[in-house]
Image: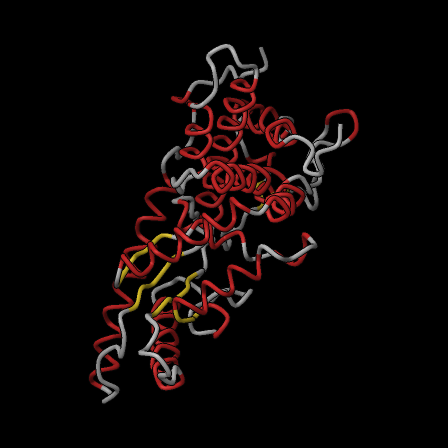
Amino acid sequence: STISPFKSKFYEFAAGHEVVSHELCSLTRRACELAEAEMEDAGHGRAPRPWAMLVLGSGGRGESLLAMDQDNAIVYADGEHGADDGEADRWFAELGARVSYILDLVGVPYCKGGVMAMNGEWRRTLSAWQDEVGTWVRRRRPEDILNVDIFYDARIVHGDRGLGASLLDQAFRVGAASREFLTLLKLNACRFDSAIGILGRLKLEEGRLDVKKSGLLPVFSAARVLAIQEGIRVRSTRGRLESAMGELARDDPMREVHQNLLEVHRIVLASILGQQVRDMSRGVPPSNRVAPAEMTAPARQRLKWALDRVDYVSNLLGDPLGRG
């Protein structure tokens, strides 16, 4: 069997990402409350329409680590027929800017990629968001859906939950119905460079390895595709893989693929968080790059085992183009 021999008691910081993500969502919720109060105090009044704040990406999945940044979006209700959205949007633009400023102030930096509700691309009415989702599933190149996939990890952290839920319901329904969209997501998930080089050595740069890119990204991307395709409305990578595995027969060989990827995900997450704690303890900014030489021999062995099995993602998703 290729399933990991490593037991969960050896995992370093096994659930640390859940704690970090919970705090990120709590901070975002509190930032929304403070920003709303500031808007009133500044004479802008209360929200002109019902609205909801969504945390996207790793925060939504419950998998944030210590090098987190902001990934959020706002959906707000449509006005009455013929109503001008401009005034309402200006209010929510100001709110989004205040939320991001507050988050940055307390240690959650601005998103370098601009995925924040303060930017118009990530702040829309419900109908405008629904139209946008419709454009996603009509795109034809994998590079055209970068940043789209993190929307499917969204967690509603503040505001009108019914509004947010109706948007996410539609996004999953439309996504599952588009074979072309699922194919693009699968192609993106399978596009990764192995961290294992010739003679089984890790490909290091200056003694470090970006294991989010070579380990986590393919696994959580593949689990997300499965969730959209199968209508699995769990956000965490672990929950998605376990839900999909639960639909398989006991003797289905694909169960082993799921189990291996679950193990890969846990080990790589723990490796990153362990490195981040070590780095921060000596004043080094946290990142997704681990230094194997700083790890214990068993931890290094676990990481290498995990990185050697990331290509199980291809077994999980099959040939995205349906050949053979």
Residue 301: % across, % down? 58, 23
- From the image, which quarter does the C terminus lie in? top right
Q: How is the image coloured?
A: secondary structure
For residue 26, side relative to residue 155 (left or right): left
Q: In the figure, 35 relative to 162: above or below? A: below
Residue 72: % across, % down? 42, 62
Q: Residue furthest front?
A: 81
Kindly identify the residue that appears in the image at 51 percent across and 64 percent down.
132
- Of residues 292 and 112, which is closer to you in this image? 112
- From the image, which quarter does the N terminus lie in? top right
Quarter of the view holding residue 68: bottom left
Kindly identify the residue that appears in the image at 20 percent across and 85 percent down.
41
For residue 26, side relative to residue 205 (left or right): left
Kindly identify the residue that appears in the image at 57 percent across and 47 percent down.
178
Kindly identify the residue that appears in the image at 50 percent across and 22 percent down.
259
Q: Is residue 157 visible?
A: yes
- Of residues 2 and 184, which is closer to you in this image? 184
Total residue callouts: 0
Q: In the figure, 65 relative to 237: above or below? A: below
Q: Is residue 57 visible?
A: no
For residue 317, side relative to residue 15 (left or right): right
Q: In the figure, 89 relative to 149: above or below? A: below
- Of residues 103 and 131, which is closer to you in this image? 131
Residue 34: % across, % down? 24, 72
